[in-house]
Image (cartoon, rainbow, N blue to C red):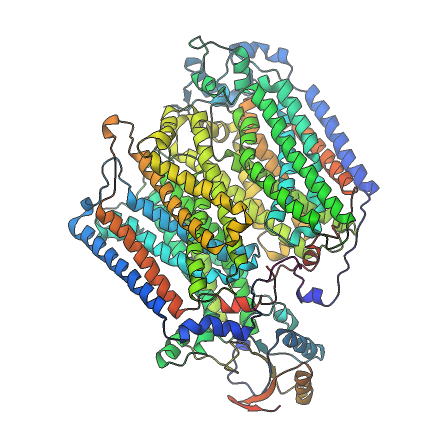
Amino acid sequence: MAHHEAHHIEISKEQFVVPAKAKMFTLGAAIIGLLLTVVGVFTLPTDSSHSANSHAKPATHAGHDNHGAAAQEAHKVDPNLVVDNAGHETLFPKTTHKDPEHPKPAFTRFWANLLVNGYFFLIISLAALFFIAVNHVANAGWSAAIKRIPEAMLTFIPVALVIVLVVLFVARQDLYHWAHYEHQNIAKGAPGYDKILAGKSGFLNSNILLFGTLLFVSIYFLFGLKLRSLSKKEDEVSKGDLTNFRKSVRFSGAFTVIYGFSFSVLSWLIIMSVDAHWYSTIFGVYNFATGWVSALTIICCFVLYLRSQGYLKIVSDEHVHDLGKFMFAFSIFWTYIWLAQFLLIWYAQIPEEVAYYYDRFNDPQFKFQFFLNVIMNFVAPFLILMTRNNKRNPLVLSIAALILITGHWNDVYLMVMPGTIGSAAEVGVLEIGMFTMFCGVFAYWVLQALTRRSLIAVNHPYIEESAYHDVGP
Amino acid sequence: MNHDSIIRQPLVVGGKTPTDVTADISRPILNKPSTSWRVGFVISFIFLLLLVWTIGYTVWTGIGVWNINKSVMWGWDITNFVFWVGIGHAGTLISAILLLFRQKWRMSINRSAEAMTIFAVMCAAIFPVFHMGRVWVAYWALPLPNSFGSLWANFQSPLLWDVFAISTYFSVSLLFWYLGLIPDIATIRDKIKTKAGKFWYRVFSMGWTGSTRTWARYEVVSLILAGLSTPLVLSVHTIVSTDFATSLVPGWHTTIFPPYFVAGAIFSGFGMVLTLLIVARKVMNYENYITIGHLEAMAKVVMLTGTMVGMAYITEFFVAWYSGVEYEQYAFINRATGPYWWAYWSMMFCNLVSPQVFWFKWARTTPWFIFMISIVVNVGMWFERFVIIVTSLHRDYLPSSWVMYSASWTEIGIFLGTFGLFFTCFFLFSKFLPVINMSELKTILKNRE
Amino acid sequence: MGIIDKNVMLRNRGKMLLGVYEDEEKVMAAAKELTGHGIPVLDVYTPYPLHGLDRIIGIKRTNLTVIAFICGLTGFSLAALMIWYMNVHDWPMNVGNKPLIFATSWIPVMFESTVLLTAFGMAFFFFWRNRLAHGIEPELLDDRQTDDRMVVVVEAGNVNEQEVLSIYRKTGAVELRERLNGTQKVVG
């Protein structure tokens, strides 16, 4: 407060023009990413080289026999028994190994990656929309100055939706064990009949997967468009006209409830069903936490970038500090939810549940990334963002942001890969390339969206409050 | 300089100055207690005596005077424990989480909500302690060298986590509350005329003078304590939830328990805060400080957390079906249609349906109506714990262990008695300490919501 | 002890000039005016915190966060050590055939004791640094400074006393006083 009181803060419209450098950089990243993806796809192990293996055992094991040998020995004996490292028989069915009759083409890895990235950027764009809504509902003042950034981010929802839908439409039988099972259409009692999957078919079926996803995300996006247009209208009417603001609050309330109730279902449909036999009631909250903390991080990145280019004049270190606090706090929240799921499943050791972590934690294939997940998404941001000075330092914040975004990508990777392609998964040229491409496209898309309206919502009723924002002691 | 948006409502109405705040808030402390205070205190004290009597009877005769049995080994006792711990959570939420989110409306209510936290945790602790049976060896729960062998406490046990969580929560909440009280105790110290009053308020004010140097550090300390209390309050009910969720009992072992218990705790806590404050603001004439705006904000929190809890009920039910595990499926069908169906549907109605009335502006701005809903919420959250505990336990894997459970008069007496303890403490608090944080409130007299 | 901030103590000081105010904005103006004229403000006594005043009169931000961090680290390590000693070293306890050293089920207790030690350690140092202790005699300058009055304190000696008093007067003080050896005299 003290350093603001001395002067009056001018609040005026700002028109953003994407600098040539930014265009070059984002499109460059997209193109390089695309090239790497193509290279990655062409250097995938071809199906023929695997065919010998595929017949003997699931293709998901191809190429990594050294670590999974013991498990596969047992697998031949009984699909529900595996042998742990010490050689003791345990009762952990490996969910990824449930499907010995269904060798997956190597190209599945491409689709799995597309699902990881499409879903990751989908939940980020949705969380950006949720950010706007929740700030309206909570009457938050501080964020008014930066609200145009999440407004731009939510325009990515349809892009991500189309990508996810294409994956689900084309490749669902390769990615989802249950979809393949549905396709096989095995009669009750016939060999290969799976009582559990048959019991779930009222929810896990292709119609609900495709139309449910389309319906939910379209509804969210309509709310997003409505909030965007109300916000734009507010710029055009006279200051003090609260009609648009009041409408925004009402739409935000409705959206918050709808999103809260349906997002879990969306995450069950698209991601939890990857491990078709497994279930976890907290899964939706966990996915929300991932998307939410990533979206906050990306909002912070855009604020830092725009400020470095001389835009967002009313945004001060105080706002950046608050965003840093959000990144810090919600990293801890994410860890809390992560731990709640892991601790309870690890502790109770029920075979059908613990199989999920058996695939991730005990499998050397994913063990490193499993620990990396906690280090990148909890330890690193916790230590880096603990002090006040670091939260106000753009360079430190950018480093933390980079770690967090990559870390949460890794998080989604770990949710999808073990259940879809199992031991054929690795972080190679394809993965790095596709993630780079998505980052480039997303950044370009959002920068373009930012040019379509003033960067400052000059008529927002809380804009003065936000301009004079002070984080206090 | 104040830049609050004009569309916000004033936080304190009636054009109060700092002088008025001191006068209004310290009046009950400086004056003789009112008749309504005396009556309320005596009634509470009678219930406190009931607590003493029923607990004495339990300890003297043995834990067999409770109706818990081999299958339902947790009954009213643990239900009440979780109920009271949950009620405590609103205090920390208001003072810590709302402080971090800079919700200034918290300033009129945080003091009494924090006091409530402390008294509720005291009530809660009674239940597990006396459920031990041989309460005189309760100290065995502490990580002390066991004199009966070389065995130490088992740190893998959620019950031991509870010992740590509840005692840490109690101590840190007490510290946070006391830290907030120091400047106000100093104010009373400089106002009170009686000799004993001068002495005791001087002792507890710790020589506070209001130096800007001290204030600057004080605010940082408050902020860090708030930052610590936030994960602490989450951890407490999380750990309470792990008492159930780490087990293999159908209906208990579900991963959403931690956040769902926390949401439920905040929900029930706000229910109790509303119950208390709607009465207090009327009786103590604090309508200018605890305005309709405050009640409305709290009603919104009740609606939000109630919906979150309802969402968790539905999630659990759906995932039980989705899991394909017949025990899980049975546990939930049995909850809704078994012998305790009335408890389940009371819970559903009170917690999920009733808070939805707060979508209507009239409902969340009418004190008597909010008061009624807050009672419904309190009842509903008690039923929630009863449903979780008793319906899951009364059907075991072995049908020969299937039993019914209803509380004995001793168990009911202890539960009613804890209300006596709670309200006795609250009445004493409202007589001897300022129920609204004066020094904090003085900073926002010109502010808006 | 060295930990106590000497600036919060008023005893053993020479002559002090006090400006008594009843409005926070006037206090802020006075503090700005005084520091603007190069007059150091010893302290301002207020019934409630005035945000930004600490920065105006040049109070450094407290290092209590560092102490909090150290206390937290201590609590964390002590708990880990305790659990390791009790459940691994002294009496290895096999529960459900879980690995003996596996932090997952240690996390709750380690977390709680981290919070406990951070909170109490920090509060302890806060009390110490600010000379707050049970039963201590408060050094009050005005019996309404915890109610509705604010007292600006400047140490006489190296400053022009008339200038200080005129700034007090100009910025709207309701009373001007001098304090010497614990006794006060109203000067305007």
Residue at horizontal 52%, vertical 69%? Answer: B439
In the depicted structure, whether residue A99 falls above or below residue A374: above
Foreground: B372 or B202? Answer: B372
* Coordinates of residue B279 in the picture (x, y in percent): 42, 60
* Image quarter of the N terminus of chain B: bottom right
Image location of residue A370, percent across then percent down = 53, 34
Q: Residue A256: percent from the left, percent from the top?
A: 58, 41
Residue closest to the eye, B285 or A170? B285
**Type of secondary structure dominating the magenta stretch:** loop
Please say if A392 is above or below C56: above
User: Is residue C2 in view from this perspective?
Assistant: no
B9 within the magenta span = yes
Q: Position of residue A435 (x, y in %)?
A: 67, 32
What residue range appears in magenta? B3-10
Q: What's the residue at 53%, 11% (across, down)? A: A184
| Furthest residue toward right | A20
Above or below, A165 relative to B157: above
In front of the other: C89 or B261: B261
Q: Left or right: where does residue A337 sit relative to residue A301?
A: left
- Residue B349 part of the magenta segment: no
Q: Is residue A378 visible?
A: yes
Task: Say whether residue A377 is left or right of residue C162.
Answer: left
**Residue drawn 60% across the image and 70% down it:** C50
Number of numbered discs on residues? 0
The residue depicted at 76 percent of the width and 39 percent of the height is: A449
Q: Quadrant of the C terminus of chain B?
A: bottom right
